[in-house]
C-alpha cells in the first residue's frame, strides 16, 4: 500500500519538481527477475530509482533501520518493511548470507531487486571496488544484471541535509548483462571477483566517475 502511494502520488510530484534525466529505461525488462546494480552517492538514490523505474523494486537496507526502539524505531521498521526492503548487517557473514537468500527469494518470484555493488555510499564521489554479493546473487538466481549510473544525487541530497535541493540529476540504465556462462560457479571466488569487476566497469562507463580500487568503508553515522 505504502509503495503504491509513493509511486503513484509522490513519484509524479517529485518528477515534476526535480525533472530527472532518464536514459536507457528500455533496458529494464518489463517483467521477470532482474537485478539493478547502481553506484551509490546518496541516501536519496533509493528514492530516485523507484521514482523512474516503471515496475516495483526492492532493496537491501541497513539492519539498523529495522531495529530501532520507540515510536521512531517502529515507524522506520514499518516504512522499510512496507517498501519490501531486505535488512542486511554489514560485516557479519551469516547475516549477510541470510539477506542475500531473502533477496534470492524475491528474484525467484520474478521480481526486480536493487543492490549497490559498493556496499555503501561513496564518501568521496568516486566509484569504489565492488563487493561480490552482487555477483553471487546474479549467478545463483540466473537473473540478468542491469548496471545503473546515477549522476548528481550527491548534490541533490548531500550528507547531513534533510530536504533535497533542486539540481540536475541523471539516471542511466545500461544493457542487461547475462552471466549464464558461469552457471554453477557461484562458489568460485575468482569468478565472483571477475563478474563483480565487469559490473563495476559498466557502472563506471555510465556514471563517468573516477575509479578507486579499494572498498569504501561504511560512514561513521548514516
Image (spheres, rainbow, N blue to C red):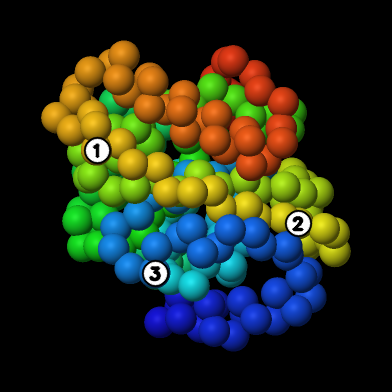
> Can residue 61 be seen in the rendering of this structure?
no
Pointer 1 residue: 180
- Left or right relative to 108: residue 155: right
Q: Is residue 13 left or right of residue 67?
A: right
Residue position for label 3 = 30
Secondary structure beneath dot 3 equals loop
* Rendering coords of residue 2 (x, y %): 46, 78
Q: Residues within 10 Å of mark 3 (few under 14, many from 20)?
A: some
| Sequence-wise first label, 1 or 3 | 3
Mark 2 lies on residue: 169
Depth order, front residue of 76/190: 190
**Residue 98 location (% of width, % of height):** 23, 40
Label 2 SS: loop
Of the image marks 2 and 1, the number of the one nearer the N terminus:
2
Q: Quadrant of residue 58?
A: bottom left
3 sits to left or right of 140: right
Task: Give the foreground label among 2 and 1.
Answer: 1
Q: Residue at x 55, y 29 (%)?
A: 201
What's the distance in space between the residues labelled 1 and 3, CA to CA? 20 Å
Q: Nearer the viewer, residue 19 or 101?
A: 19
Element assignment for label 1: helix
Give the quarter of the image for residue 51.
bottom right
Q: Nearer the viewer, residue 101 or 79?
A: 101
Residue 40, quarter of picture: top right
Give the vertical position of 213 relative to 40 (above or below). Answer: above
Amino acid at each position: 500500500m505504502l509503495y503504491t502511494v509513493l509511486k503513484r502520488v509522490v513519484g509524479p510530484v517529485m518528477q515534476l519538481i526535480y525533472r530527472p534525466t532518464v536514459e536507457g529505461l528500455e533496458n529494464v525488462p518489463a517483467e521477470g527477475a532482474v537485478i539493478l546494480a547502481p553506484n551509490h552517492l546518496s541516501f536519496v538514490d533509493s528514492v530516485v530509482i523507484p521514482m523512474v523505474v516503471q515496475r516495483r523494486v526492492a532493496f537491501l537496507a541497513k539492519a539498523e533501520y529495522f531495529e530501532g526502539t520507540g515510536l521512531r524505531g517502529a515507524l522506520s521498521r514499518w516504512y522499510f518493511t512496507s517498501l519490501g526492503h531486505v535488512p542486511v548487517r554489514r560485516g557479519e557473514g551469516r547475516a549477510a548470507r541470510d539477506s542475500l537468500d531473502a533477496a534470492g527469494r524475491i528474484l525467484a518470484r520474478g521480481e526486480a531487486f536493487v543492490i549497490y555493488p559498493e556496499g555503501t555510499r561513496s564518501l568521496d564521489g568516486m566509484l569504489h571496488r565492488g563487493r561480490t554479493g552482487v555477483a553471487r546473487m546474479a549467478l545463483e538466481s540466473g537473473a540478468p544484471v542491469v548496471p545503473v549510473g546515477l549522476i548528481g544525487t550527491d548534490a541533490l541530497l548531500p550528507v547531513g541535509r534533510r530536504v533535497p535541493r533542486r539540481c540536475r540529476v541523471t539516471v542511466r540504465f545500461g544493457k542487461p548483462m547475462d552471466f549464464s556462462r558461469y552457471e554453477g560457479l557461484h562458489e568460485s571466488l575468482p569468478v565472483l571477483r571477475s563478474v563483480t569487476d565487469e559490473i563495476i566497469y559498466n557502472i563506471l562507463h555510465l556514471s563517468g566517475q573516477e575509479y578507486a580500487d579499494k572498498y569504501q568503508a561504511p560512514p561513521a553515522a548514516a
